Image (tube, helix red, strand yellow):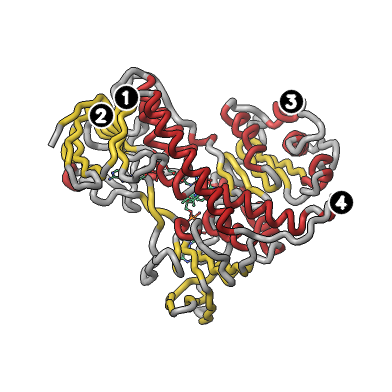
Amino acid sequence: MTNKKFDVVVIGAGPAGYVAAIRASQLGLSVACIERMHTLGGTCLNIGCIPSKALLHASEEFKHAQKGMNKHGIKIDGVSLDLSSMMAHKDDVVDQLTKGIDMLFKKNDVEHIQGDARIISNQEVEVTATDKEKTIISGANIIIATGSTPADLPGAVIDEKQIVSSTGALRLTKVPEHLVVIGAGYIGLELGSVWGRLGAKVTVVEYLNRITPGMDEEVASQFQRLLKRQKIKFKLGTKVTELETYQEGVKIRLESVSEGKNDEIDADVVLLAIGRIPHTSNLGLDNLGINIDDRGFIKVDDHYKTNVDGIYAIGDVIPGPMLAHKAEEEGVAVAELISGEKSHVNYDAIPSVIYTNPEVASVGKTEEQLKEEGREYKVGSFPFVANGRARAISSTDGFVKILACATTDKVLGVHIIGTDAGTLIAEAVLAIEFGGSAEDIARTCHAHPALNEAIKEAALAVDNRAIHF
Ligand code: FAD
Ligand code: NAI
């Protein structure tokens, strides 16, 4: 058993951990990053953001080649799917990007230690490598960045073939005839869209009476309408009472939440996407007495300190949105705080994006949140159907909605449903970060013809003076 010493030991090499490790090293600290997987990048690069976006893009291209080009005067006959090549491309992207983190670690002198980490004291981590060899790594500071794992549905056994988590849904070897998705959230709608575009019949079962809880309701209902138009079926207000697997498929027994009415459907694949839970098992938290909340998240203060001196936590394992860019911001902040710099994350300016077609993106407050907080606000909306570029590229679905303070005009929330919403939202994030007003956006010259002119117009509409609608 060897013993190595570092200023900072990071557990987990996802976007929270690898970014913290690189930033700490940039600040002159000696850093080790322990990761149990054989590739770096965590959920995001290996089984999350990146492979899902590769498949979302590829499946959209397939759909577009099949049906989307005619109106532009392009005729394509005989479009067919080569699923294994599509998957190979996705795997190749993952491979390149995970190796890229290896290179970044080398460039930044971060020591990469492969193995399973368990914290044994506030300055020591025991690492068990794949060959079972144990090493003790000492760190003046330990950062827990162990991420999250899919939540289970009691009674459902994920075999990653018939009943799959997102991980299995990114690796199916054939297009299911009927995919039943449980949970109308980020994963369910993104991966449901992928397989729907590739030819599966898709039914989404959701416990609540709406999709995407937390999203501005006006946007969510338009989103559902557009997904229905893509033939995705929804069973809202419905709970799953039993999943029974048989050789060719799965029987899903359902019950309506309000009336208790029973129903059943059959699928060849069921995707369980009912949320993710913080990953803290076998980390040694109990022995050290590290506080976790009633949902299993590690409790931290605003400097990411746990209640145990020298131990910090960031990313999906602490409360807040489970998003890669939030995890990265926390990675930078914790490293800077440990090295004695001032740093913080502005949680009011964290965007979220669902990469479906159309994309849905938002930052700041929803209308429902503002009502609940009793705040006076103004609304400005602008539909893409009135945007010249959207018409030119035949992407007229959706709208931009800006919520601004009724007295100061400060931008409080921006919600976009439409093509490229995930990119367009950056302007709104910047406005919120800078404490900008709707008038600031409205007075900013936007290139023409561009989709983001719809943001300028929505900002004008806050003051009832949109030009093009
Ligand atoms: P993780 O990325 O989960 O990394 C934690 C790492 O810690 C893992 O590599 C794990 O192996 C390692 N680890 C855990 N325990 C130990 C231990 N004891 N010893 C050693 N190593 C350990 N977010 C977005 O912002 N945009 C997206 O488009 C997006 N798409 C997603 C799609 C899918 C299908 C999924 C599942 C998630 C997606 N997310 C997306 C969420 C995003 O992946 C997470 O928010 C992000 O990865 C969290 O980063 P993290 O570093 O906190 O944790
Ligand atoms: P989610 O929290 O987004 O959605 C889960 C859905 O399942 C909710 O609508 C919830 O009401 C529903 N649900 C919960 N229990 C249920 C039950 N028993 N029966 C039926 N419905 C039930 O979780 P999801 O989709 O699993 O994603 C996890 C997280 O991963 C997201 O919250 C997000 O943070 C992250 N993610 C982000 C992406 C992005 O940024 N584009 C893409 C994919 C995931």
Answer whether labels 2 and 4 touch (C-beta < 8 Å): no
Quarter of the picture holding the C terminus = top right
Identify which amino acid the numbered label 3 is placed on: Thr
Q: Which residue is mark 2?
A: 141
For mark 1, give the secondary structure. Answer: helix
User: Earlier along the polypeptide chain: callout 2 or callout 3?
Assistant: 2
Q: Which residue: 73% across, 36% down?
A: 452
In the rendered structure, which disc, 2 or 1, sits on the residue that comes first in sequence? Answer: 2
Question: Nearer the viewer's eye, disc 4 or disc 1?
Answer: 4
Image vertical order of residue 265 relative to residue 124, above or below = below
Residue 114 placed where, x, y %?
29, 40
- Up-down: is 433 above or below 82? above
Asked if the residue at tag 1 contacts the one at tag 2, i.e. Cβ–Cβ closer than 8 Å, the answer is yes
Residue 247's disc is none
Asked where in the image residue 449 lies, by quadrant, the reply is top right
For the residue labelled by badge 4, is the local secondary structure a helix, a strand or a loop? loop
Position of 48 compared to 1: left or right? Answer: right
The residue identified by callout 3 is 444
Q: Which residue is mark 1?
A: 338
Horizontal and vertical percent position of residue 324: 47, 41
